[in-house]
Image (cartoon, rainbow, N blue to C red):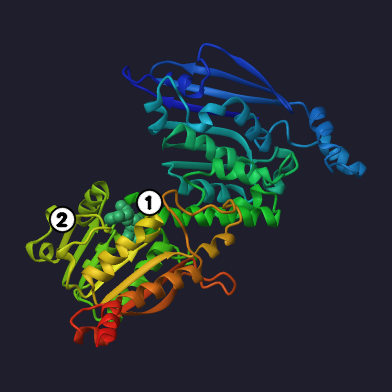
Amino acid sequence: MFMTISTTGTPERPATDLGFLLHKHPDKAQTFSTSHGTAHVFYPEASPERCTAALLLEVDPVALVRRGKGKGRGGAPDAALASYVNDRPYAASSLMSVAMSAVFTSALRGDCRAMPERAAAPLALRIEVPALPARGGAELVRKLLAPLGWARVDAEPVPLDERFSEWGDSRYVRLVLEGELRLCDALRQLYVLLPVLDDAKHYWVAPDEVDKLLRAGEGWLATHPEHRLITSRYLSRRWGLTRQAEQALELVRLAESDDLDVESVDNAVDEATDTPERPVPLAQQRRDAILSALHDAGAARVLDLGCGQGQLIQTLLKDARFTEIVGVDVSMRALTVAARRLRLDRMGERQSRRVELRQGALTYTDKGLRGYDAAVLSEVVEHLDLPRLPALEYAVFGAARPRTVLVTTPNVEYNVRWETLPAGHVRHGDHRFEWTRAEFRAWAGEVADRHGYTVAFTPVGPDDPEVGPPTQMAVFTLAESDGATGGKNANEREKEAKAA
Ligand code: SAH
């Protein structure tokens, strides 16, 4: 089993830096013993211009069989023979992955104390695997690797020995990858995809394989168009484990679409529209639900309270019905990104009159926020410590008093649909709490009562018959009579009624 990793360099950034990134010195040939044989790392070439590291794994077939035994393998005589006479020693497969994780542990993690900035940056890489067993052939190899950022994915079928040429090509391909990728990403992809392509594991797949897969899949697996094939094959088609992994990836996708990172949100949305079978990200479903509730309310002048990085504002700006949009957030960083996203500096005068971003804390009243048609609090309340919530409630429902208030928040009951989310954990590090449907309804009902609103509830995302939807939305509407009582709230009206 053989694989080479090459890079090119310049006098300022010599190619031999690869040695630092792999934690293996280019001048030395090193040997590591792994559970199934011996791994060698050496450098066939190491100059400032070009450097190639080779990983050669010598498999001990006898050790392989011995280890295989007692783990449910090799019962019948034929099977035992197949264990001795197989392609394990020659082809890159799950054994190669195990060797990679043993030999390149730090590089897989992306750790490099000597040159952290080099490890974090893309590198001009060329990776070659001369004999890669691929069930599904060259086509599948391309399908799995092409979406991962490589400029060149060459998968050339290896012909069978000429004596067997009438049988066509073997199930091996010669793989060459070229592109600018971080070394750790390239290694993680191969770590997962070698056994996936081989479609066999030399060891028993235990539940901790899910964690290994998720760790190695970080940053690329959740959004890979073939993520289902990859998880299923990687986990040897063990359905329960595959389901666990898929649920965790779903959570990653949701978190990414909730994420504060502009690019990932935009990509998630673009990809979702490219591939029809991909579910629409929850963040987009939420924006759609908010948009339609604002339409129903006939709102034109809208507050986006806790607007974050301005994704909703961007959606609202595309709709001429919204004549004035004010985004408020306490985070200057978020507002800066929002301004960039909306291209506020390059906006024409008419457009820029429609939108305003202002920094502010929602727990303080602000006269400037009075008199709007609607206010949106999208995924905001759960970011406040519960004792601060009454202050926000008063500032919004008591002081600003828009005709309509939309509040969305996670439904914590839905979290069980993600088995790998540890029990009792919230979906996002900054969530101070997450409510059940009953808790949210109780809070919203009291708020509505206290301030003279009526409230209705709308599910956002798939409404699970048992646990409900992932996001819950409350639509508050100022009670009709409120206008007549001059904007007084229910308590005040009650007091007046009692006094009378
Ligand atoms: N509404 C956006 C962002 C939600 S994240 C969306 O749906 O995607 C929550 C946002 O609320 C963050 O941007 C955070 O800075 C803001 N926020 C939290 N507490 C706040 C407070 N007390 N005052 C103003 N903004 C607050």
Is 232 in front, or is 453?
453
* Place of residue 384 in the rendered image (x, y in percent of width and height, measured from the top left): 37, 55
The quarter of the rendered structure image containing the C terminus is bottom left
* Place of residue 86 in the rendered image (x, y in percent of width and height, measured from the top left): 78, 37
The answer to whether 306 appears left or right of 366 in the picture is right
The quarter of the rendered structure image containing the N terminus is top right
Q: Secondary structure at mark 2?
A: helix
The answer to whether residue 157 is visible is no
Q: Quadrant of ligand 1?
A: bottom left
Tag 1: amino acid: Ser
Q: Secondary structure at mark 1?
A: helix
Tag 2: amino acid: Leu
Q: Which residue is mark 2?
A: 344
The answer to whether 305 appears left or right of 457 in the picture is left
Q: Which residue is mark 1?
A: 264
Instruction: Characterize the local packing of mark 1: few (<14), some (14-19) or many (20 or more) Cα atoms within 10 angstroms.
Output: some
Is 327 in front, or is 104?
327
Residue furthest to the front in view is 499
> Who's the residue at 74% across and 39% down the image?
202
The label shown at residue 104 is: none
Give yes or no for contact between labels 1 and 2 (Cβ–Cβ under 8 Å).
no
* Place of residue 212 in the rendered image (x, y in percent of width and height, measured from the top left): 61, 41
Instruction: Characterize the local packing of mark 2: few (<14), some (14-19) or many (20 or more) Cα atoms within 10 angstroms.
Output: some
Position of residue 167 relative to residue 327, above or below, is above
Is 284 in front, or is 423?
423
* Place of residue 494 in the rendered image (x, y in percent of width and height, measured from the top left): 30, 82
